[in-house]
Image (cartoon, coloured by chain):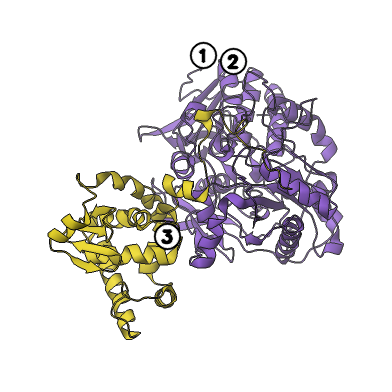
Chain colours: A purple, B yellow
């Protein structure tokens, strides 16, 4: 049923990337009868192929192309060439995500006016409000089958959740439950329900977790209006003398260079590759890269304030049994500057298997302290901290001196923690350790951030063209038929896992693109 | 991370043991081997003094491998893990040394340096340094060096990526083929 489009067909919308943003947009446009070519750098893997083995799965799915790092974040030291833990496959990082689907809060869309000036932070209000996005959140939650919405029951709590919930009760937290998860708690939309496999990060072999790889993409293909080209590695976007984008150059699965003509181009390669592509597409007309008259392309890189706390107990927990992210505490997600920082954070259970626990518990650590902690593995509970980090102009994706496998400049990811990030992380560590201590932890481990999974903000939305890269619909301020469709649009990060918002923005953007095409604006 | 990726393959090499192993202690001794603490070091192989396991060594000196196995234990000491698990974890280093002369040199020189540091501390050799704390002191003095970093970076994958290690630490791993953990204890905590 897939529609093969000619390389010279300049009536197609070309989408670069098939994750939460690109995959959703591709299906939404195809459903409207718009012709779409989606170029995906990775291969197509489906649930039957997913490997429930952490390192083997990492080799199968992770984006491990050349990247460099700089800045004071610990990832730059411990994982110098792996700034982000994201996926290179059809479906992008929706194959890997844990499924947490929380809405960004009203005040978080107005970070600058609500928090006030924060020294060193490049805060800005989003050019849209929660009210603007609410109808699309409704659609996204329905599409993704988010638990605790649309009458869908919550998932049962596993061991890791039970420990967190007991601690949350002791600490007096009031909002702790098994989450709003895009994981089927009962069969839905032709997909099975969760069997608590314990490998959400490695791709859900049940297909119970929503991923564009086996929901949006095949639905789009079934319309006959979507062609997905896997293993198509985009190099540059080309424009004509009027400054309109007209084609996308990529290397195909056989290593040959191809050029696909386009009526419009939507960039959805995640917050590292999307700005890199715009920067690598610099021309004599756009010497600083496409869509970059503001100079903000690649800047304001956010990764969420993160960290983990693992705790050991006298008795077994076996946290790895069941969903990776089995529950959430939202009490700390409010904005309460009396805690010593602006913005807030969520606490979400997180389990790692032995191989990744060894790699991430204390990167670089060794000796008896380390192995004694590993010896308590099956008695451990764990949670992840995810909070709003401050956008900073100097935290940026730039072009590295290193080259990728095609000879193009690789991205460098520079990140320094803002003092607000550090204050929030310390608060969260303290709360999480107190939580586990309250239910009898014998040891707690404040674990540093992993390579980033939430990469945001590098092509941010702004009301004014001088403040950002795209408008409230993800449309470039500079180039009318060039769109950004992934998390790099985020003006600020909020405290919530970003996928639900990326999907909601993509549904909204699809409506806008369709209108613009009907009106012959693009 | 490059080291990590390559080390993920190390565990496979255990299948490449020579047929016939493990030899009995008598057979090993009959081949005229030197005794070295926990290990028997022969031409082209390394074995446990108890003769419970043995491994072929292709590129590195067998004595070098014996020291690497001890070093691996000293980096991630788990008293309930047998030496074989550490031997498997560093076997990839020997494999890599067969095709990478620079790497081979790094390993041989690294071990030679460990022995020099042990001698300077009044010990016969690294392997023959009796207390773990004395060996760890030597390792702490070189932990920023490329040799140590390469060893540790590979080991954190190749040691902890072994199914036997998973069992010893109580990790059951993949559950899909058993229908998941839904009816197999995903919520069986009853001590809260």
Instruction: Give the letter of the chain under mark 3.
Output: B
- On residue B91, the disc is none
Near mark 1 (Cα within 10 A), the count class, few <14, some 14-19 or many ≥20, is: few
Please tell me how many numbered marks the rendered image carries: 3
**Is residue A515 positioned above or below B37 on the image?**
above
Residue A401, percent across and down? 44, 59
Q: Which residue is mark 1?
A: A1
* Residue A480 at x, y percent in the picture: 65, 36
Q: Position of residue A404 (x, y in %)?
A: 41, 49
Dot 3: what SS? helix
Sequence-earlier tag: 1 or 2? 1
Residue A474, can we see it? Answer: no
| Circle number at residue A223 | 2
In the rendered structure, find residue B153 and report the number of the disc placed on it: 3
Question: Same subunit under labels 1 and 3?
Answer: no
> Which chain letter matches label 1?
A
Judging from the image, mark 2 belongs to the subunit labelled: A
Could you say whether the residue bearing mark 1 is in a helix, strand or loop?
A: loop
- Dot 2 and dot 3 residues touching (CB under 8 Å): no
Position of A453 relative to A13 (above/below): below
Residue at the image point whose x is 60% and y is 27% from the top: A26
* Residue A457 visible here: yes
Residue A387: where, in percent of width, then height? Answer: 72, 53
Crowding near pointer 3: few (<14 within 10 Å), some, many (20+)? Answer: many
Seen from the viewer's position, the closer of residues A124 and B25 is B25
């Amino acid at each position: 049923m897939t529609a093969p489009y000619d390389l010279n067909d300049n009536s197609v919308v070309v989408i670069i990337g098939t994750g939460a943003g690109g995959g959703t947009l591709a299906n939404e446009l195809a459903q409207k009868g718009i012709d779409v070519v989606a170029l995906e750098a990775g291969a197509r893997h489906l649930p039957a192929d997913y490997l429930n083995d952490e390192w083997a799965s990492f080799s199968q799915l992770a984006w491990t192309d050349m990247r460099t790092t700089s800045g004071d974040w610990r990832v730059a030291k411990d994982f110098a060439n792996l700034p982000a833990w994201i996926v290179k496959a059809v479906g992008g990082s929706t194959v890997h995500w844990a499924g947490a689907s929380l809405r960004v809060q009203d005040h978080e869309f107005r970070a600058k006016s609500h928090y006030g000036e924060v020294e060193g932070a490049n805060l800005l209000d989003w050019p849209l409000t929660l009210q603007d996005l609410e109808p699309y959140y409704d659609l996204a939650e329905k599409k993704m089958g988010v638990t605790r919405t649309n009458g869908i029951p919550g998932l049962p709590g596993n061991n890791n959740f039970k420990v967190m919930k007991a601690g949350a009760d002791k600490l007096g937290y009031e909002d702790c439950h098994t989450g709003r998860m895009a994981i089927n708690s009962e069969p839905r939309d032709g997909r099975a329900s969760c069997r608590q496999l314990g490998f959400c990060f490695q791709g859900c072999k049940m297909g119970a977790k929503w991923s564009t790889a086996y929901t949006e993409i095949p639905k789009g293909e079934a319309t006959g209006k979507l062609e997905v080209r896997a293993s198509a590695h985009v190099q540059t976007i080309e424009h004509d003398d009027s400054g309109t984008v007209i084609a996308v150059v990529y290397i195909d699965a056989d290593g040959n260079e191809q050029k696909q003509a386009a009526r419009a181009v939507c960039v959805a390669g995640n917050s590292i590759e999307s700005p890199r592509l715009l920067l690598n597409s610099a021309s004599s007309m756009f010497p600083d890269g496409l869509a970059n008259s503001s100079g903000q392309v690649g800047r304001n890189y956010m990764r969420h304030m993160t960290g983990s706390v693992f705790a050991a107990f006298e008795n077994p927990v076996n946290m790895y049994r069941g969903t990776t992210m089995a529950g959430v505490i939202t009490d700390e997600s409010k904005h309460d500057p009396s805690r010593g920082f602006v913005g807030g954070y969520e606490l979400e259970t997180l389990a790692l298997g032995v191989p990744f626990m060894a790699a991430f518990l204390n990167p670089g650590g060794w000796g008896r302290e380390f192995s004694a902690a590993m010896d308590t593995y099956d008695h451990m509970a764990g949670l992840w901290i995810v909070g709003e980090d401050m956008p900073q102009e100097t935290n940026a994706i730039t072009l590295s001196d290193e080259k990728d496998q095609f000879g193009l400049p690789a991205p460098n990811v520079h990140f320094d923690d803002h003092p607000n990030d550090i204050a929030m992380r310390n608060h969260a560590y303290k709360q999480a350790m107190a939580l586990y201590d309250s239910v009898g932890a014998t040891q707690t481990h404040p674990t540093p951030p992993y390579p980033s999974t939430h990469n945001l903000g590098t092509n941010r939305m702004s009301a004014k063209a001088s403040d950002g890269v795209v408008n409230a619909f993800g449309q470039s301020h500079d180039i009318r038929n060039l769109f950004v469709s992934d998390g790099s649009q985020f003006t600020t990060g909020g405290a919530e896992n970003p996928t639900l918002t990326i999907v909601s923005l993509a549904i909204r953007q699809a409506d806008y693109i369709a209108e613009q095409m009907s009106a012959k604006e693009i | 991370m490059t080291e990590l990726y390559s080390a993920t393959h190390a565990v496979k090499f255990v299948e490449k043991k020579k047929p016939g192993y493990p030899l009995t202690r008598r057979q090993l001794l009959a081949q005229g081997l030197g005794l070295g603490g926990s290990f028997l070091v022969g031409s082209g192989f390394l074995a446990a003094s108890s003769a419970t396991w043995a491994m072929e060594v292709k590129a590195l000196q067998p004595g070098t491998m014996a020291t690497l196995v001890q070093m691996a234990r000293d980096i991630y000491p788990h008293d309930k893990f047998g030496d074989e698990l550490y031997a498997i974890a560093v076997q990839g280093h020997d494999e890599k040394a067969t095709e990478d002369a620079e790497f081979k040199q790094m390993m041989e020189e690294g071990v030679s340096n460990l022995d020099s540091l042990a001698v300077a501390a009044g010990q016969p050799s690294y392997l023959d340094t009796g207390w773990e704390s004395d060996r760890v002191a030597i390792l702490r003095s070189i932990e920023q060096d490329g040799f140590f970093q390469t060893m540790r970076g590979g080991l954190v994958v190749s040691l902890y990526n072994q199914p036997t290690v998973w069992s010893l630490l109580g990790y059951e791993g993949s559950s899909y083929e058993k229908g998941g953990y839904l009816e197999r204890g995903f919520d069986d905590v009853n001590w809260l």
